[in-house]
Amino acid sequence: MLDADFFRRWMTAAAASVDREAERLTALDSPIGDADHGSNLQRGFKAVAADLEKEAPDTPGAVLVLAGRRLISTVGGASGPLYGTLLRRTGKALGDAAEVDRGQLAEALRTGVNAVRTLGGAAPGDKTMLDALVPAADALGDSFAAARAAAEEGAVATTPLQARKGRASYLGERSIGHQDPGATSAALLVAALAEVAGE
Amino acid sequence: MLINVPETVVADALRGLAAAHPELTVDVENRVIVRRDAPVAGKVALISGGGSGHEPLHGGFVGPGMLAAACPGEVFTSPVPDQMVRAAAAVDSGAGVLFVVKNYTGDVLNFDMAAELAEDEGIQVAKVLVDDDVAVTDSLYTAGRRGTGATLFVEKIAGAAAEEGQPLERVEALARRVNDSSRSFGVALSACTTPAKGSPTFDLPAGELELGIGIHGEPGRERRPMMTSGEIAEAAVDAVLTDLAPRNPVLVLVNGMGATPLLELYGFNAEVQRVLAERGVAVARTLVGNYVTSLDMAGASVTLCQVDEELLRLWDAPVKTPGLRWGM
């Protein structure tokens, strides 16, 4: 079973991972975006980790809701509202339970991912974070490791796609051939989850 | 770069803005710039915002006759909802606020969230999207047209209507009409360098230029060998005119992207005026300068806005902001 502490460690691991990979994320954002994805997420997750050190929400849902709100109020851009909504809605779907199992988390994550779809108006194949998140949420029903692999595969598979949403879409066909930074950071978030689960 | 460290670029600029303009209230910590006499009794308040790096947009357009408040985000990153909620609370007189939002996914999402939160606090909020850039095909396959130069026309004309005391529905309708009557096209002669990255956002060799660029250092739609000022004016004006067939006179904004000298901009304007005359487009007013910039990008954009007597009267109305000032 996964308790509030597990979710705190997930967020802390995500913050560390984003910190390590910030330069790569910004580099990916440079040819097809505006070269700030890494620094923006770094700022947001740093704030989340600091909050979770001060406060200790006592349910998994409360940890994710707090993290989501913090991302919305610190990141800006499209990723702030989108990642914030992902975590907030996933957290809300977990309810007040003191512990949840992997199946419940997978179900809640699907709710969070659907909220992202509604908010951003994107669909899988549009070269966005959804290309990592949708397969990850589906695979999480099997195992944490499967979710990580699905997210990474989904992120790599954005390279030949033409962007239809976000700033990369302004480039039209010139967005082809670059891995999507949003899908890449989404895969980092899922990898941090698998890492904390010991898979 | 003339900075201390990348992390404090926006805060440093806000402190400098505050020092230079005591007529503005600048909340550096919360990143809100407000005209000092706000809220102005009985008047609608315009609030805009967006990523930093486009100065004087938006903070330089705060003052009587234009914006009541501006919310600067990180460089090229839209502001967070808390900033707009704070701005709305500071400037709302009870007559309502109009959010002027450039059409980028991030700006739209953050302003939408802010509108919901402000409405929860009993503030009447209307929104207008600016999407004037003809270089982006508006279709299901893109995030829609970008908001660029027309933002200045929307903020000036709707701001004048608000200053006159026109009600929110009217100010909103005027803002929408200005956006619908405006189109832009931009070219870059060099990429820009964001403080966070420290190197150019894309690789543009000398001797080449990008047509159809935005204002965030993103590459354009097409790369070509260097063209003359006259050839660029033809490409830009014709791109705009494929989508806007003005029957009335137009406002012309010849806008520098940040690193192109005024000497070149005025020369470019001469070519723009020549092409407009050749295409039979009458010019009502012209503005030349760096208004909607993209850090240190070299290049220019052309924005045309078709105006009737009412829009022209509001354009000519007095305005007093750090970036735009006439008639008072």
Image (cartoon, rainbow, N blue to C red):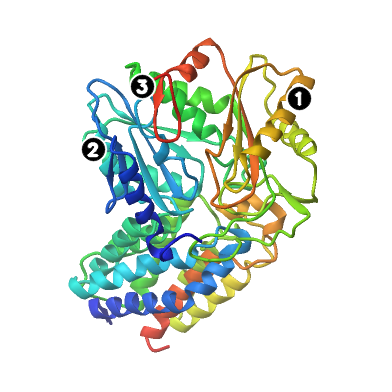
Q: What residue type is labelled 3?
A: Ala
Which numbered disc flags the more N-terminal residue, 1 or 2? 2
Which residue is most to the front?
Answer: B263
Residue identified by numbered label 1: B274
**In the picture provided, is A162 more to the left or to the right than A81?**
right
Residue identified by numbered label 2: B89
Question: Which label sits on residue B162?
Answer: 3
Instruction: State the image coordinates of residue B321 (x, y, percent, origin top left).
Output: 39, 31
Q: Disc 1 and disc 3: Cα gap in Å?
A: 35 Å
Query: Which residue occupies the foreground of this view, A127 or B314?
Result: B314
**Subunit bearing disc 2:** B
Query: Which residue occupies the foreground of this view, A4 or A101?
Result: A4
Look at the picture and state if A47 lies above or below B40: below
Instruction: State the image coordinates of residue B157 (x, y, percent, origin top left).
Output: 46, 23
Label 2: few (<14), some (14–19) or many (≥20) C-alpha neighbours in 10 Å: some
Q: Disc 3 and disc 2: Cα gap in Å?
A: 17 Å
**In the picture provided, is B300 more to the left or to the right than A80?**
right
Residue at the spot 29% in from the left edge and 49% down from the top edge: B82
**Subunit bearing disc 3:** B
Query: Which residue occupies the foreground of this view, B56 or B145?
Result: B56
Q: Which amino acid does label 2 sit on?
A: Ala
Which numbered disc flags the more N-terminal residue, 1 or 3? 3
Label 3: few (<14), some (14–19) or many (≥20) C-alpha neighbours in 10 Å: many
> In this orientation, does residue A153 appear?
yes
In contact (CB < 8 Å): disc 3 and disc 2: no
Whether labels 1 and 2 belong to a single chain: the reply is yes
- Residue A24 placement: quadrant: bottom right
> In this orientation, does residue A140 appear?
no
